[in-house]
Image (spheres, rainbow, N blue to C red):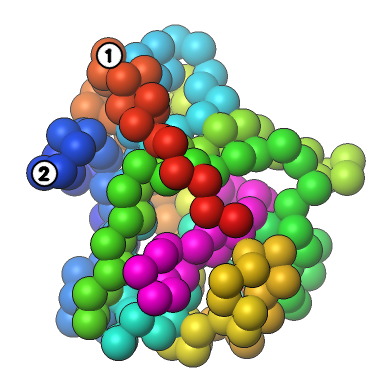
Amino acid sequence: QNNLPNTFTDPETGIIFNTWGLPNGAPQTQGGYTFGMALPEDAFSTDATEFIGYLQCAAKDAQGWCGVSLGGSMTNSLLIAAWPHEDTVYTSLRFATGYAMPDIYAGDAKITQISSSINSTHFTLIFRCENCLKWNHNGLSGGQSTTNNFMILGWVQAFPSPGNPTCPDQITLEQHDNGMGIWGAVLDGNVANPSYTAWAAQATKTVT
Ligand code: HEM
């Protein structure tokens, strides 16, 4: 996983992301994994509470799921799980206090989608994540400070699809089996953009 970010511009929406990932062919995970983030213009001077996220994950024949830990570790961090099903990419906000099936996150974070796509090898989701950079799960709190220009994040991928895939609150998961890790994500100037507000306004699709 790279620490210094790459800059990626999504061709469809024009959204500019800092991205970190593992290329297809990397030994840590089959198929590769990319997470990206875009932040409000003032994120280096005032801690942002939200971001626009980019996830491109491996999925053979649209099977599998992936995730990101917004605090790095699986435990005591806000987790986002994502998976494809038919023509939809679903997400679930989760929180784990141990290395077992995470609970439904009890805080007020919210995901709305900007775009998604699924092909025979990968799925991609661009989403707005509001109230996602500080978390509070029944009193267990934490978060990220965008003014630090640095975040510890975690990634995970799995081959089997979730059970109950069309109902994010009721998914069942097996322990992930296609790699996981923690990385230090350095943010550079391309992550914070004056167009953030206009990009975030494109997040109009709620998938529940
Ligand atoms: C690590 C179990 C779901 C994210 C781990 C580890 C275990 C585990 C045992 C440590 C493995 C090791 O160090 O060798 C499980 C089980 C799950 C589950 C049983 C569900 C049934 C999830 C989900 C996410 C996630 C939904 C995120 C969306 C991570 C991350 C790590 C990890 C980022 C690496 C960082 C760390 O060790 O804390 N998981 N997990 N896991 N898990 Fe999970």
Which element type, helix, strand or loop, lies under badge 1?
loop
Q: What secondary structure is the stretch in magenta mostly built from?
A: strand
Is residue 12 rendered to the left or right of residue 69?
left
Q: In the image, which is nearer the foreground, mark 2 or mark 1?
A: 2
User: Which corner quadrant holds the N terminus?
Assistant: bottom left
Q: Position of residue 135 (x, y in %)?
A: 70, 38
Q: Amino acid at mark 1?
A: Pro
Question: x, y percentage for residue 56?
Answer: 30, 62
Q: Residue at x 39, y 76 (%)?
A: 86
- Left-right relation of 5 to 163: left
Stretch of the chain drawn in magenta: 69-93
The image quadrant in which ligand 1 is located:
bottom right
Q: Read off the residue under disc 1.
A: 194
Which residue is under mark 2? Answer: 11
Q: Taking 175 as reference, is 156 above or below it?
A: above
First in residue order: circle 2 vs circle 1: 2
Above or below, 160 against 186 in this view is: below
Q: Quadrant of residue 12?
A: top left
